[in-house]
Image (spheres, rainbow, N blue to C red):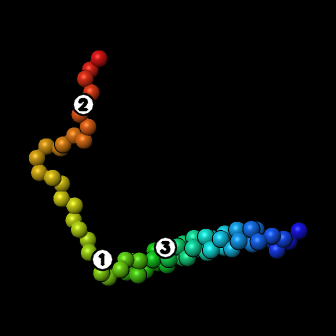
Amino acid sequence: MGLSHCPLCQGLAFLCLVRYGAYALLLWNLVSGAKDPAAATPSTATAIPFAPPEGPPQTLLPALPAC
């Protein structure tokens, strides 16, 4: 039984081809960006430095009472 035995299998095969093609393209871009760091980051991106907030750290959740 070949790949052309039903339209559902043909559609699934095509979707798998697109999916793994996208993974291959992503991997290609990551590997080529690792060789040339300037190509990995767009020139329009700007770095925003991290500045911790002033004062004591704030808790996100209230403390639970001790039993």
What separation in Å lies between label 2 and label 1 (alpha carbons)?
Answer: 40 Å
Q: As drawn, which residue projects farthest toward the front? A: 7
Q: Position of residue 14 (x, y in %)?
A: 69, 74
Q: Position of residue 22 (x, y in %)?
A: 57, 73
Q: As drawn, which residue projects farthest toward the left? A: 55
Q: Which residue is mark 2?
A: 63
Q: Amino acid at mark 3?
A: Leu
What separation in Å lies between label 3 and label 2 (alpha carbons)?
Answer: 43 Å
Camera-near label (3 vs 2) is: 2
Q: Nearer the viewer, residue 2 or 32?
A: 2
Q: Nearer the viewer, residue 13 or 11?
A: 11
Q: Which residue is mark 3?
A: 30
Lower position in the chain sequence, tag 1 or tag 3: 3
What separation in Å lies between label 1 and label 3 (alpha carbons)?
Answer: 17 Å
Q: Which residue is mark 1?
A: 45
Disc 3 secondary structure class? helix
Disc 2 secondary structure class? loop
Camera-near label (2 vs 1) is: 2
User: Badge 3 local density, few (<14 within 10 Å), some, or many (20+)?
Assistant: some
Q: Image point 24% across, 41% down: which residue?
A: 60
